[in-house]
Structures are given as C-alpha cells and as structure tokens.
Amino acid sequence: YPGPVEVGGIRLRNHLLLAAGILGTTGASLARILASGAGGVVTKSIGPSPKEGHPGPCLIVVDGGIINAMGLPNPSAAFTEELAALQGEPVVVSIFGGTPEEFRTVAGWFAGRASGLELNLSCPHAEGYGAAIGSDPALVEECTRAAASYGVPTWVKLTPNVANIGEIGAAAERGGATAVVAVNTVKAMRISTALRRPVLGNRFGGLSGKAIFPVAVRCVYDLYEACSIPVIGCGGISTADNVVELMMAGASAVEIGSAVIDDIDVFSAIAKDLYGPDGVDAQEIVGCAHA
Ligand code: RRO
C-alpha cells in the first residue's frame, strides 16, 4: 500500500502490525498474517524457560472484548526454529524476563534472527514478570538497557495499569528503546454469580478489545508528550478510523490483536480504507491532536 515505513528502526510494509499474543506462536501462523496484508508481525512473548501457562479457562469473551490469563505459555529458546522460514520478513520477537539479566539472555537468542525485539514489561497477571517490572521506572530503564545492548531495534511495550505511563516511557527511552508500544491489556476479572467463584482459572486476567480503545488513545497521547522516540499504538483497534485517531494522538504505527480473532483479514480491510482514495496522509496526521 503506502510502500515501506520505518518505525523505531524497523522497516514495515505498512503502518499495521499484528499485536503480540495473537496467533504469534508458530512460523506458519505469522506467515499467514503477513500474507493477509499486515505490515509486520509481533510474536507471542518468549521467556527464559519453557512455560505451560495458567490452568483454564484462560480466555473469556465479555461485552466489548476478551479477558485472557494465558500465563505466558512459550517454548523459550526453541522458538528460534519458528523463525527459520521468516528470515528477511518484518518479524518482531516479543520477549519477557524477571530481571535485567534474563532480558539480556533472551534478547541474545533473537537479536539478529528477527527485525527487532519488543520487550514485554506489561503482562498484568504474571507473577514476577510483566507489570511488576513495567511500573518501576528504574527497572524499566535497566531491563531495556540490558536487552538493547545488542544494538538491534528494541521496542518496549507498556502497561496501562499505572498512573504515570509518560514517566515509564521516558525511562525506556533512557535505557535505549527505539520505540514505545502502548498498551498491553487492562487488569480485569469476572465472577460467576451462579458458581460464586472467579471465572478464569487464574482468577485475574487482562482485558483487550474495543472496550479499551479510549484507554489506548489516552496512553498514546501521554507518551507522545513524554518521549522523543516513536510511539506505537495498540488496544482495541478494529477500524481505519481507530487507526487515524491513534495517529492523531501520536502513534507512528499501530498493532492490532483482538480484531484479528473476529476477522483474520482485518489488515487488508483496514489498509483498503486507510490508504484508499478517501484515506489520509499518515505522516501528516501523527500527533496533530496536540496542536
Ligand atoms: O500470556 C499472557 O497471559 C499474557 C501476556 Br504474556 C501479556 O503480556 N498480556 C496478556 O494480556 N496476557
């Protein structure tokens, strides 16, 4: 569509990426999403050791979205095999760890095997991983510095479950992030009134989908003010107008997740509207709502 776009050091085919965690567990599913018109893809998060994930149910559909508590299931270093057939494609590997050292280790497995890294500092229900790190500016800076030490493009995905996302983004930038991504899921839970107990096997989860779109707009707006690196918008996008709105808030590109579950070809549908005759000049509108 618009030709290549460079965001945070990574060359994309357009402004629309697959968000981490959705259909990102195999090389075949990532290739399928690229073939359906995505400008790039982000993998399911990979960590320092293999993990089975939380007991089920680990995903429930609610009004306006989905609550998940997958529990960081991943094959760890063995995931490198899934990347073999995707060399040269716009693939970003999402990684997590519990310490700066673990981030350095996991980043080392994938630096050079993909277009870049996305550090997951933001899972809302991961003991010792995720948001526990992502709400502490000093730890965010340290983990980012450790992973970015390989000199490959390093994006940092942030949690909306903080009072100071701008401060957290600025810490990632000091650590060497080449872009910040906002947002991961919003802390959530449901209780079965019939069974009188939480619905999810893990009790708590993270909400994604249309319901969180306004949260994403606000977080992107704050990060655009606080950072000088690009901001990538994520959270509840399902239309080209959503993409335009997040760009006006400050997003240089966007990630789409939950909407892919409803329509695997959502990327080409949105691209058609975004880049068609009635479309907008993306470059021209980024951050225009700050004027
Ligand atoms: O695997 C998960 O449960 C999960 C992760 Br790693 C994340 O970053 N965000 C989320 O909502 N779920």
Image: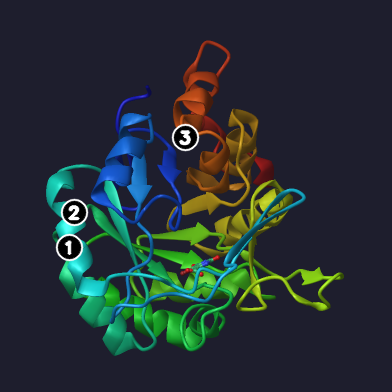
The amino acid type found where label 2 is placed reads Leu
Viewer-closest of 202 and 188: 202
- In which quarter of the view is residue 141 placed? bottom left
The amino acid type found where label 3 is placed reads Ile
Residues tagged 1 and 3 counted as in contact (Cβ below 8 A): no
Q: Which mark is residue 80?
A: 1
Residue at the farthest right position: 193
Q: Which mark is residue 83?
A: 2
What residue lies at 51% left-to-right and 87% top-to-bottom?
127
Give the residue pinned by disc 3.
Answer: 264
Residue 7 can be seen, yes or no? no
> What is the count of numbered marks?
3
Residues tagged 2 and 1 counted as in contact (Cβ below 8 A): yes
What residue lies at 34% left-to-right and 69% top-to-bottom?
74
Q: Is residue 168 left or right of residue 85?
A: right
- Calculate the distance from the C-alpha at mark 1 to the C-alpha at mark 3: 25 Å
Q: Earlier in the sequence, mark 1 or mark 3?
A: 1
Coloring applied to the structure: rainbow
| Residue 50 % position (x, y) | 30, 78
